[in-house]
Image: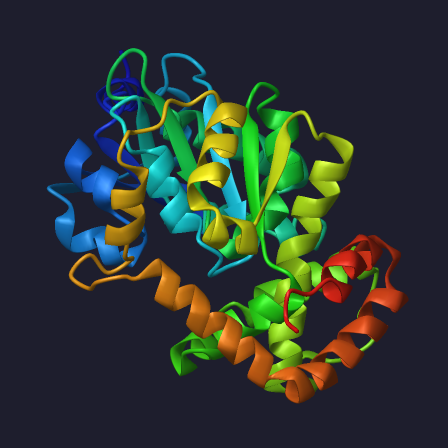
């Protein structure tokens, strides 16, 4: 048995998380994590590094030996700050569901996938699709028989949805969205969130440029309101498109509905994915926080968000006017118009 096969057989252990891929070097980075750490982690990016018991670097080819069989996967995609972590905690409230939240490797696949038609791309489309299929196969490894993995990607990764549906024909997807007024409020309630949007702006602009067939504006021309608007549009479109074409495999969840009727929406999502639910949904809801050392009051958070949205009507109107023209200029984005026009804010 060759050294790569030995290494691959070692990595069959689901305790080895495929942390990231260094695409230009065709290398994989792995972290050894126990199930408890994986279950409680909100982010499997650089923030999980201090929790790793071991770290390992391997050739990319090892991912073909690190899986014994394809397992059913459930997915959550979302447009950002719309309750995805909360829903993932509720759905993973029993031992039968193992959450894998926001793995960094999916962000890498998302970024590479936008550019596979470019001459500078490190992989062509065929290789990218093959790697995506194997990455999800690796992420699907359960700790025990009867356990299903729930993968929640970060908001920048909604461009993966179509490829996931092709590569994994038996999987199902929950897509969590917000109407523009609530997304705008969610992204302006904390100044640090604008830093997050700016950090992913280039990737979102590239995806917009790819889907629109050529941008009608330059990235450096965007003001903060337009950055929020473009982020909402780029994140939302793949979820709406997939749900319209494959409703039997993609179920949309409205952020407003999730906040106002958490238990009902959790039951609807669990039934769609074929998951059991814990008995203490409301306890999970009230104790939820991305930062586990901080308290969380969902009713207060929702009330504050609605009040903020009501106070933003005029400034949001400017962003909406710009976004309306962007949607008009690109047919692929026109299915987002309903969610631009619809509002709960009176």
Q: Is residue 65 visible?
A: yes
Image quadrant holding the N terminus, namely: top left
Foreground residue among 268 and 207: 268
**Residue drawn at x 56%, y 76% as measured from the top left:** 309
Q: Is residue 227 left or right of residue 80?
A: right
Q: Is residue 52 left or right of residue 19?
A: left
**Residue drawn at x 32%, y 53% as measured from the top left:** 45
Q: Is residue 21 visible?
A: no
Image quadrant holding the C terminus, namely: bottom right
Foreground residue among 302 and 21: 302
Q: Residue furthest left?
A: 53
Query: Residue 271 in the image: x percent, y percent?
Result: 50, 24
In this picture the colour scheme is rainbow
Query: Residue 228 in the image: x percent, y percent?
Result: 60, 74
Foreground residue among 199 and 134: 199
Query: Residue 154 in the image: x percent, y percent?
Result: 46, 52
Q: Is residue 290 left or right of residue 267?
A: left
Q: Is residue 87 left or right of residue 254?
A: left
**Residue drawn at x 68%, y 88% as measured from the top left:** 314
Foreground residue among 297 and 326: 297
Q: Is residue 217 above or below residue 328?
A: below
Q: Quadrant of residue 60?
A: top left
Q: Is residue 39 above or below residue 78?
A: above
User: How many numbered marks does the figure carry?
Assistant: 0
Q: Quadrant of residue 69?
A: top left
**Residue drawn at x 37%, y 27% as measured from the top left:** 149
């Amino acid at each position: 048995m060759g050294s790569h096969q030995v290494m691959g057989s070692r990595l069959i252990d689901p305790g080895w998380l495929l942390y990231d891929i260094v695409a230009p070097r065709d290398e994989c980075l792995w972290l050894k994590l126990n199930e408890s750490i994986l279950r409680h982690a909100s982010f499997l990016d650089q923030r999980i590094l201090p929790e790793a018991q071991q770290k390992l670097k391997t050739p990319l080819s090892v991912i073909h030996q690190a899986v014994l069989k394809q397992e059913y996967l459930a997915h959550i995609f979302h447009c950002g700050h719309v309750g995805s972590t909360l829903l993932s905690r509720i759905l993973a409230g029993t031992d039968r569901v193992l959450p894998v939240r926001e793995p960094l490797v999916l962000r890498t696949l998302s970024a590479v996938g936008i550019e596979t038609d470019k001459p500078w791309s490190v992989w062509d489309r065929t290789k990218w699709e093959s790697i995506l299929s194997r990455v999800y196969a690796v992420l699907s490894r359960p700790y025990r028989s009867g356990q299903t993995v729930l993968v929640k990607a970060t908001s920048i990764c909604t461009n993966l949805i179509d490829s996931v549906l092709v590569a994994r024909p038996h999987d199902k997807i929950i897509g969590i969205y917000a109407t523009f007024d609530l997304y705008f409020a969610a992204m302006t309630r904390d100044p640090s969130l604008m830093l997050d949007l700016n950090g992913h702006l280039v990737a979102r602009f590239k995806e917009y440029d790819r889907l629109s067939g050529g941008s009608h504006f330059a990235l450096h021309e965007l003001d903060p309101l337009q950055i929020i608007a473009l982020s909402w549009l780029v994140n939302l479109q793949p979820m709406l498109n997939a749900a319209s074409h494959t409703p039997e495999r993609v179920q949309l969840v409205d952020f407003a509905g999730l906040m106002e009727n958490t238990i009902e929406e959790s039951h609807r999502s669990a039934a769609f994915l074929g998951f059991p639910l814990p008995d203490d949904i409301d306890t999970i809801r009230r104790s939820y926080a991305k930062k586990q050392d901080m308290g969380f009051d969902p009713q207060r958070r929702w009330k504050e968000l609605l009040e903020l949205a009501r106070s933003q009507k005029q400034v949001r109107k400017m962003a909406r006017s710009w976004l309306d023209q962007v949607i008009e200029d690109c047919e692929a984005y026109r299915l987002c118009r309903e969610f631009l026009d619809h509002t709960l804010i009176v």
